[in-house]
Amino acid sequence: MPAAGWYAQQLLPPALLTYFAWAWRRCTYDVGHAYLVKTLGYRCLGTAYTALPTLLVGPIAIIFSRLYLLPRAQAVPPALPPRRLLRRETIFEVPAPASGELTYVAPLDDGALDVLGDAVLDTVDGGLGGGAGRQGSKGADDYEALERAVDDGLVERCFRGTCRGRWKPARARHCSECGTCRVGFDHHCAFFANCLTAPNLPPFMALLLLTPITTTFLSLPLYRPLLARARDAYRASTTADAWWWASTWTWIVPAGPVGRHIGGAVLGWRALDAADPRMRAPEAVDRLEMAVLVGLATVLGLITLGLAASSLGLIRRGELTVDRARAKSYARALAAAGGSLRAPQTPQAVRAPRAPRTERADRAARADHADQAGSVHAAPALPFSPVRWFYVPLSLSTPTRRGGVMVPSRADERPYDLGARNWALLLPGRWWLPWARGMRLEAALEWPIRDEVRDRLVEEAAAFAERRAEGER
């Protein structure tokens, strides 16, 4: 991360918390008590408004602090996959095979299955190369068998940053700013100087929806006096600050023509406040300080309202923010490639490779084993393709069959779009409460796929296995 970006992320969260405290104090004492109750005589309305900042700004500050103070290890995947994935008993997303074809994966031998059945896997910390996770195994030899199972080409690992070969589950992404992978990664948010992940979506959505409501309600009593004062300040600036309007650089430097007029109004406003002793009193809600307060509140309200609408649309489709970014990158790559995608080749049988120790070795081993199987390599796939690959155990269609098939999804289907279940998965229960918890980390490690996609994958894997069996006869 550039130095300027790092410093901005360190300063922005405390600045926002300071703004929340400033807004709470001014709205509670200056607007509610001094202006509405004492100046205008609205005792009931003023009393209600005095309590409103605590009821609205308080939860916002609590939710913001909760997201800002998330531990750096939040949503970091375990070193090894869950046992069900290692034993290949369920459907799970896998890296695309080097051949880009439907691929048969030979079953684990009985010895490896025995090891995987008895071992207690570490799910907290450490990379595969660092020795973490060995405590629960029966010995070094058994752990080597576990490593072979992890590195057989069905599991993606990350060697960037501090991951050190950590397992990278489906829908996990490596955050280059934090230097680690996150399960259910949505995006890295500069406002919190931290990553936002699927397990923390409920407080994030509550913050986005509560902020525009709060800024609107707390600013309502101030709109009329501030607009009247802004008109007077703009008129005063045309005569008192002639140098501003005569300077040509003011058309460009303060954000163009709009910034030129706003800057002139601010100069006039400051001059009016300096000439009016009344502006020093708390009930003077039309002073420049209150205009800055409401202006920042309006900007925050508009930003969070737009983010809330966008995030709700993504949740409805079962997507995360990173998925939309990847789709845009794929569209650009597709346009740069002239709109052509490679066609699938004839399926080949490939036996899974054994555990490499580096990312480069991972890729080389998969390509080498595809070559040994005689598969024909197609052109390199475009990055961020919407096609996802899944390992499908053949036992799901025929219990007596062993092994599995790597099957791709279709480009036009969204495997993780669960329809109405998206809301219950990502925003469970009373998600709007400041202390509400989101998606369980265990569920994010094995993200469920849509039933129709699951059924099609099972059928396609069974059909491929039948064709392969007939070809061997």
Image (cartoon, helix red, strand yellow):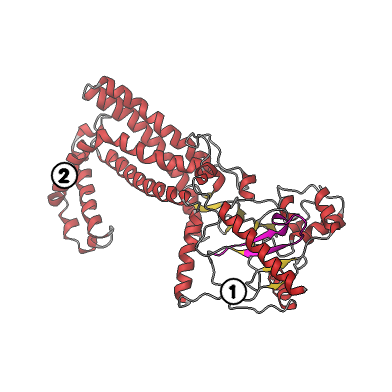
Is 183 displayed left or right of 16 in the figure? Answer: right
Does dot 1 land on a helix, a strand or a loop? loop
Amino acid type indicated by mark 1: Pro
**Residue type, mark 2 in image:** Arg
Q: Residue at x 74, y 59 (%)?
A: 150
User: Label 1: how many residues lie within 10 Å, few (<14), some (14-19) or many (20+)?
Assistant: few
The percent coordinates of residue 409 (x first, y second) are: 57, 62
Q: Which residues are magenta?
A: 387-407
Residue 411: give x, y in percent of width and height: 52, 65
Point 56% across, 44% down: residue: 199
Residue shown at 48% from the left, 43% from the top = 204
Q: Looking at the image, tell me whether mark 1 or mark 2 is earlier in sequence order.
A: 2
Along the line of sight, which residue is nearer the eye, 61 or 183?
Answer: 183
Q: Secondary structure at mark 2?
A: helix
Q: Verify whether residue 395 appears in magenta.
A: yes
Badge 2 density bin: few <14, some 14–19, many ≥20, Cα 10 Å: few
Q: For residue 17, which quarter of the picture?
A: top left
Image quadrant of residue 105?
Answer: bottom right
Q: Is residue 67 above or below residue 162?
A: above
Task: State the mark number for residue 231.
Answer: 2
Judging by the rendered image, the residue that carries numbered circle 1 is 344
Q: Quadrant of residue 272?
A: top left
